[in-house]
Image (cartoon, rainbow, N blue to C red):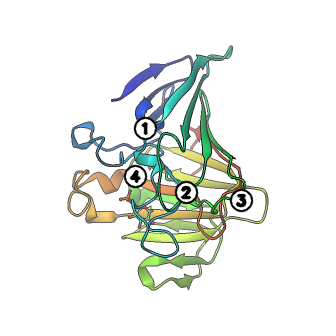
Amino acid sequence: MITDYQNDHCRFKVCHQRGQILSWQPRGQADVLWCADENLMSLDKPIRGGIPLCWPWFLKGDSGDLAPSHGFARIADWRLVSNRQLEAGTHRLVYQLTSADTSSPHYPHDFCLTLEYLIGEILTMSMTLQAFTAAAPTPAFGAFHSYFNVGDIEQTLIEGLGSPSIDNLANRQRVQEPEQVMITGPTEKRFAASNEARQTVRILDKAHQRTIKLVQAGHSDVMLWSPWTETGHSLKDTHPDDYKHFVCVETAAISSPFANHASLTIFSDKEPQYR
Ligand SMILES: O=P(O)(O)OC[C@H]1O[C@H](O)[C@H](O)[C@@H](O)[C@@H]1O
């Protein structure tokens, strides 16, 4: 179910069947991505960890009644269409999912979705949608639902999210946010992606003495999620203390649909930039 790779820059793990990266460990660093214990995983359920692609809706969609939650892409069988190493040693993996492989009454269109990963010193994930439907397809929403590995969530700050947030756990109230956001309990907050074409968010992980930098394009929102102590309880595919070691910073299309292309690039910098 899980395949390990190594190149000059990093080690990484993928689940080819899900087209999902689960681990990316740049040379000399701790894993940048968090992933649940393999013994608690099952292909019957979404794999909790790495970067699942939620598509073509987020949670249960705007209507609140779409199933499966977070769309069908993260539980579909993807096809690996290219797997090679570039000259610089970086791996390039390309997966495709088409309407012939999976179908949903909530997205009744002919499409081909391509996911491309460049995995080396930096990690880039990009998604391209080709629609073959004569009529305009139903708008597609979702997220690159990234799980980031942090040494200690209580010593982690996230900056570049902007303000205000919309707090899903407080009746969608608008909350004025500081420049650096700290997670101190269950968190489910949505931030508007900046008006600039590209937005940078930083995760300052004091315990690992590193900064993870995310540069995104094509997403309208950023979701910040931590289940806090729900790990090991309502989240049955996790252990009780897991919440201490991950934060989800999800570049997402929630308030506006995805265009045909969206990307996320992740850098991990060992220099301590924690202030
Ligand atoms: O458990 P999952 O279906 O993977 O969803 C995990 C989480 O994803 C997002 O961040 C949502 O905002 C949360 O409400 C949800 O609990």
The residue where tag 2 is placed is: 108
Which sits earlier in the primary sequence, circle 3 or circle 4? 3
In three-dimensional space, the C-alpha distance between marks 3 and 2, rounded to whole angstroms, equals 11 Å
Q: Ligand 1 is in which quadrant of the figure? A: bottom left
Circle nearer the viewer, 1 or 4:
1
Mark 1 vs 4: CB contact within 8 A? no
Mark 1: C-beta under 8 Å from nearest atom of ligand 1: no
Can you give x and y, in whole percent of width and height, for residue 59 in the image? Answer: 45, 65
Disc 2, SS: loop
Residue 246 is marked as 4
Residue at (67% x, 17% y) in the render: 88
Circle nearer the viewer, 1 or 3:
3
Mark 1 vs 3: CB contact within 8 A? no
In three-dimensional space, the C-alpha distance between marks 1 and 2, rounded to whole angstroms, equals 18 Å
The residue where tag 3 is placed is: 135
In three-dimensional space, the C-alpha distance between marks 1 and 3, rounded to whole angstroms, equals 26 Å
Which sits earlier in the primary sequence, circle 1 or circle 2? 1
In three-dimensional space, the C-alpha distance between marks 4 and 2, rounded to whole angstroms, equals 35 Å
Q: Which image quarter: residue 265? A: top right
Dividing the image into 4 quarters, which one contains the C terminus? bottom right
